[in-house]
Image (cartoon, helix red, strand yellow):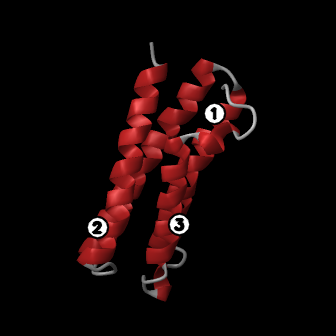
């Protein structure tokens, strides 16, 4: 909605959500291999969904649809929060690694909420 050259990539919200995905993939390598089809898969899927839905909604060029995709991204942030808490409580993540990814999740969440607020009448 707006910037044609860079489109959604120019959005700070998308950039921070993308950074979150990269951090999720980094820490997921620390999980036990038996979680590859369990928690790792769920965490990665949910995290990728965040910037993907921001991008898809942006490309729809209709405010109502854009908001719908932003709310889906917001729901995925809730999933990621849950999966990260589980990973920490199960001992798959150290406090340091948990905080590294959780801080990125919180930052992406704040930006997404701000974007939604700016577009929702």
Q: Residues within 10 Å of mark 2 (few under 14, many from 20)?
A: some
Q: Residue at x 69, y 37 (%)?
A: 7
Q: How many marks?
A: 3
Residue 88: percent from the left, percent from the top? Answer: 28, 73
Secondary element type, mark 1: helix
User: Separation of disc 1 and disc 2 at Cα?
Assistant: 29 Å
Is residue 97 toward the left or the right of residue 116 in the image?
Answer: left
Mark nearer the viewer, 1 or 3: 3
Secondary element type, mark 2: helix
Q: Is residue 38 visible?
A: no
Is 61 rendered above or below residue 89?
above
Residue 73: percent from the left, percent from the top? Answer: 50, 42
Q: Residue furthest top?
A: 121
Q: Is residue 100 visible?
A: yes
Q: Which disc is residue 68 wearing?
A: none
Is 71 rendered above or below residue 13?
above
Q: Earlier in the sequence, mark 3 or mark 2?
A: 3
Q: Earlier in the sequence, mark 1 or mark 2?
A: 1
Q: Residue at x 48, y 51 (%)?
A: 16
Is 11 rendered above or below residue 106?
above
Residue 100: percent from the left, percent from the top? Answer: 34, 68
Residue 102: percent from the left, percent from the top? Answer: 33, 61
User: Separation of disc 1 and disc 3 at Cα?
Assistant: 21 Å
Q: Which residue is mark 3?
A: 22
Q: Residues within 10 Å of mark 3 (few under 14, many from 20)?
A: some
Q: Are marks 3 and 2 in contact (CB under 8 Å)?
A: no
Q: Earlier in the sequence, mark 1 or mark 3?
A: 3
Q: Which disc is residue 99 wearing?
A: 2
Q: Residue at x 39, y 34 (%)?
A: 113
Q: Which disc is residue 57 wearing?
A: 1
Is residue 3 toward the left or the right of residue 50 in the image?
Answer: right
Q: Nearer the viewer, residue 88 or 14?
A: 14
């Amino acid at each position: 909605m707006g910037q044609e050259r860079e489109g959604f990539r120019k959005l700070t919200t998308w950039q921070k959500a993308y950074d979150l995905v990269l951090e999720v993939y980094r820490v997921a390598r620390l999980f036990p291999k038996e979680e590859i089809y369990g928690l790792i898969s769920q965490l990665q899927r949910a995290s990728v969904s965040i910037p993907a839905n921001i991008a898809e909604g942006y490309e729809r060029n209709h405010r109502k649809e854009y908001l719908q995709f932003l709310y889906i991204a917001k729901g995925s942030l809730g999933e990621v929060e849950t999966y990260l808490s589980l990973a920490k409580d199960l001992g798959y993540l150290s406090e340091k690694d948990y905080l590294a990814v959780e801080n990125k999740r919180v930052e992406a969440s704040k930006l997404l909420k701000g974007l939604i607020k700016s577009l929702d009448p």
